[in-house]
């Protein structure tokens, strides 16, 4: 099952309060999605890789869902290990990632592109170049969705650049097929994710 190969890495503030998730995917490539809060998050990711019987040197690809600090915080420390993994971000977000980290984005992604077994889903609004990644039946939504329990929420309006565009992006997800939804903040929905999305769209009402 594709779902079993997607692993959540929880990053905690001061080792206590869970703040943000990143993801390890054992797929066509060994890939990271996002990198957590700070230098320490790099260690958290490497430890999780080791618990899955991987070495960090096996990682081929790191896809950044968007350039907010809590998603790119560990990238510099990961790159400082000199392992030759590629950094990928949407074309509309890549400059922000480069500006914030001083690192080069190797792959500038576009909507619908396939990279490392993932399909890139462009979801602007939370930031200009936010993406989700579709991997088998799992949607890794970044901050384009939030959620805990059985329900999903839209992007946090307080931290989203363009609320209307962000809502339009949420609606556009109704065209995709998935069952599990993983999000940057919160637990996501392990099964029935598509139905949860449709309920969210219904709660959002007319555009
Ligand atoms: Zn964000």
Image (cartoon, rainbow, N blue to C red):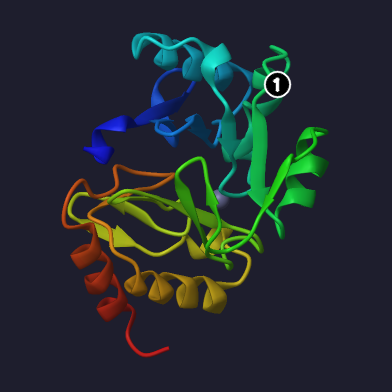
Callout count: 1
- In the visual, does 9 lie left or right of 76? left
Identify whether 145 is placed above or below 46. below
On the image, the x and y values in percent for residue 19 come to: 45, 35
User: Mark 1 = which residue?
Assistant: 79
Identify whether 27 is placed above or below 117. above
Q: Which quadrant of the structure image shows residue 111?
A: bottom right
| Residue 133 visible, this angle | yes
On the image, the x and y values in percent for residue 194 come to: 24, 64
**Mark 1 residue crowding within 10 angstroms, few (<14) / some (14–19) / many (20+):** some
In front of the other: 2 or 62: 2
Find numbered disc 1 in the image and state the secondary structure of the residue it sits on.
helix
On the image, the x and y values in percent for residue 117 come to: 45, 43
Which residue is depicted at the point 50% across and 31% down? 31
In front of the other: 195 or 10: 195
On the image, the x and y values in percent for residue 71 come to: 57, 39
In front of the other: 163 or 123: 123
Q: Which part of the image, by quadrant, shows the C terminus?
A: bottom left
Q: Which part of the image, by quadrant, shows the N terminus?
A: top left
Which residue is depicted at the point 53% across and 65% down? 123
Q: Is mark 1 within 8 Å of ligand 1?
A: no
| Residue 142 visible, this angle | no
Identify whether 147 is placed above or below 23. below
In front of the other: 141 or 160: 141
Q: Which quadrant of the structure image shows residue 35?
A: top right
- In the visual, does 36 lie left or right of 80? left
- In the visual, does 10 lie left or right of 109? left
Which residue is depicted at the point 38% across and 69% down? 173
């Amino acid at each position: 099952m594709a779902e079993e190969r997607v692993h959540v890495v929880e990053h905690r503030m001061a080792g206590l309060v869970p703040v943000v998730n990143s993801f390890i995917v054992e797929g066509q490539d060994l890939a990271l999605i996002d990198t957590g809060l700070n230098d320490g998050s790099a260690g958290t990711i490497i430890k999780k890789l080791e618990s899955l019987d991987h070495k960090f040197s096996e990682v081929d690809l790191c896809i950044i869902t968007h350039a907010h600090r809590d998603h790119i915080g560990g990238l510099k420390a990961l790159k400082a290990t000199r392992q030759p993994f590629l950094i990928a971000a949407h074309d509309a977000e890549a400059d922000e990632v480069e500006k914030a980290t001083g690192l080069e984005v190797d792959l500038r992604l576009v909507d619908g592109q396939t990279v490392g077994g993932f399909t890139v889903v462009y979801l602007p609004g939370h930031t200009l170049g936010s993406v989700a990644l579709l991997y088998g039946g799992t949607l890794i939504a970044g901050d384009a969705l939030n959620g805990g329990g059985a329900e999903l929420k839209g992007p946090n309006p307080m931290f989203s650049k363009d609320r209307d565009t962000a809502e339009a992006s949420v609606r556009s997800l109704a065209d995709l097929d998935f069952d599990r939804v993983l999000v940057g903040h919160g637990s996501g929905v392990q099964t029935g994710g598509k139905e949860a999305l449709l309920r969210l769209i219904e709660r959002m009402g007319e555009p």
